[in-house]
């Protein structure tokens, strides 16, 4: 597999999320894949887990779109630098409880590390800043001099 292919698989996964075609996105994920949201510790497994995680974010940000801004790839892995933008008009389910819709705009930078096996996603680790997201949702004040 060419190095560019690993990044293309991840980009395609996010394009399916943007289109809300979670079944097609799940087709890119192996049965044993583990999808980890590192800030919260949430873990999702396999194609069903891909659908669950995708739906969680789409429920919270129904108009949300992911933009892949850059990538670095090898034959078996890719790192994607992304931004998700949307309006928090649905409940956001977290391990700490549900956050009701705030109606606020969110623009969250994140990084996703993918493990690729035989042209499919075999592992995912998402890294994002929950404090920035909480400030954008109006649930936390920004430190003096900081921008949300």
Image: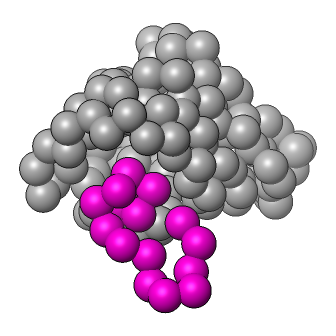
Residue 44 is situated, as x and y percent measured from the top left of the image, at 29, 43
Which span of residues is magenta-colored? 133-148
Image quadrant for the N terminus? top right
Q: Is residue 60 left or right of residue 12?
A: left
Q: To which quarter of the image does residue 41 belong?
A: bottom left
In-image side of 65 versus 56 (left or right)? right
Residue 93 shown in magenta: no
Q: Looking at this rendering, what residue extends furthest in the front direction?
A: 144
Residue 139 is left or right of residue 3, and the answer is left
Here the colouring is one colour
- On the question of residue 12 being in view, the answer is yes
Task: Answer left or right for 81 relative to 1.
Answer: left
Residue 20 x %, y % = 51, 15
Asked whether residue 130 is in view, the answer is no
Q: In terms of secondary structure, what is the magenta stretch mainly?
A: loop
Question: At 12% across and 58% down in the image, what residue appears?
Answer: 96
Q: Which residue is drawn at the image coordinates 35% and 56% (left, top)?
A: 138
The location of residue 147, given as percent across then percent down, is 59, 72
Picture residue at 38% right of the left edge, 51% below the top: 137
Q: Nearer the viewer, residue 145 or 118?
A: 145
User: Furthest-bottom residue in view?
Assistant: 144
Image quarter where the C terminus lies is: bottom right
């Amino acid at each position: 597999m060419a190095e560019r292919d690993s990044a293309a698989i991840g980009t395609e996964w996010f394009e399916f999320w943007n289109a809300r075609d979670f079944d097609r996105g799940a087709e890119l994920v192996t049965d044993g894949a583990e999808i980890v949201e590192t800030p919260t510790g949430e873990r999702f497994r396999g194609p069903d887990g891909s659908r669950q995680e995708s739906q969680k974010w789409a429920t919270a940000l129904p108009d949300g779109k992911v933009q892949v801004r850059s990538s670095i790839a090898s034959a078996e892995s890719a790192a994607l630098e992304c931004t998700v933008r949307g309006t928090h008009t649905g409940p956001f389910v977290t391990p700490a409880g549900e956050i009701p819709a705030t109606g606020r705009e969110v623009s969250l930078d994140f990084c996703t590390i993918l493990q690729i096996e035989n042209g499919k996603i075999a592992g995912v680790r998402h890294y994002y800043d929950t404090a920035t997201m909480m400030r954008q949702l109006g649930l936390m004040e920004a430190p003096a001099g900081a921008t949300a």
